[in-house]
Amino acid sequence: MAENETPAAAAAAPSQPQMRILGQFIRDMSFENIIAQKGAPSDAQPDVQVQVNLDAKKREPANQYESAIKLTVTSKDKGSDTTIFVLEIDYVGIFHVEGVPEDQMHPFLLIECPRMIFPFLRRIVSDITRDGGFPPLNLENIDFIALYRGEIARRQAETPAPENA
């Protein structure tokens, strides 16, 4: 509270958003080295495609939330369209969040929370692909704001417009 501020004014001031990462973990992961299973030629030219899905939900303790990044990474040979490897990973962060208005909680959980755990997920993906016998895959930064806006636009397009009476 500032020196010239009354207690009532301090209570009326909006609280600053606060977030702490309480934990993070791999919920589910699968890595298939298909090129090794089939004995395909090792001179393949990889074409890597990354699909990202986000999910969030409230947890039982007060102010605790879960935010998940689900990645599907598929690498195919440019010449033959043969799949080289497939990596699927569901990476979760558990957060303590306070001071975020209820109407802003959804975007906060699907933009800010994934942004905080993404560097750790990037490192795991790099290690998995390297340990799987391939050059480490260094994911580009993900624009979680654009991803969120795209999902909102997709949902609005799916919702039928109300009929005029």
Image (cartoon, rainbow, N blue to C red):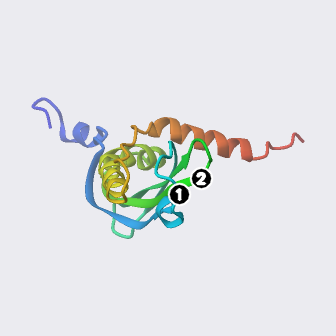
The amino acid marked with disc number 1 is Ala
Q: Residue 104: x, y in percent?
A: 45, 44
Taking the image as shown, residue 126 lies to the left or right of residue 77, namely: left
Q: Which residue is mark 1?
A: 40
Residue drawn at x 41%, y 45% is 108
Residue pointed to by mark 2: 82
Query: Which residue is at the front of the view, 94 or 9?
Result: 94
Other-residue count near label 1 (Cα within 10 Å), few / some / many at <14 / 14–19 / ≥20: few
108 vs 31: above or below: above
Whole-Å distance between the Cαs marked 2 and 1?
9 Å
Snapshot quadrant of residue 161: top right
Secondary structure beneath dot 1 equals: loop
Mark before the other along the chain sequence, 2 or 1: 1
Locate residue 124: give its quadrant. bottom left
**Which residue occupies the extreme left position in the image?**
3
Q: Pointer 2 and pointer 1: residues touching (CB < 8 Å)?
A: yes
Q: Amino acid at mark 2?
A: Thr
Residue 50 x %, y %: 51, 46
| Disc sitting over residue 78 in the figure | none
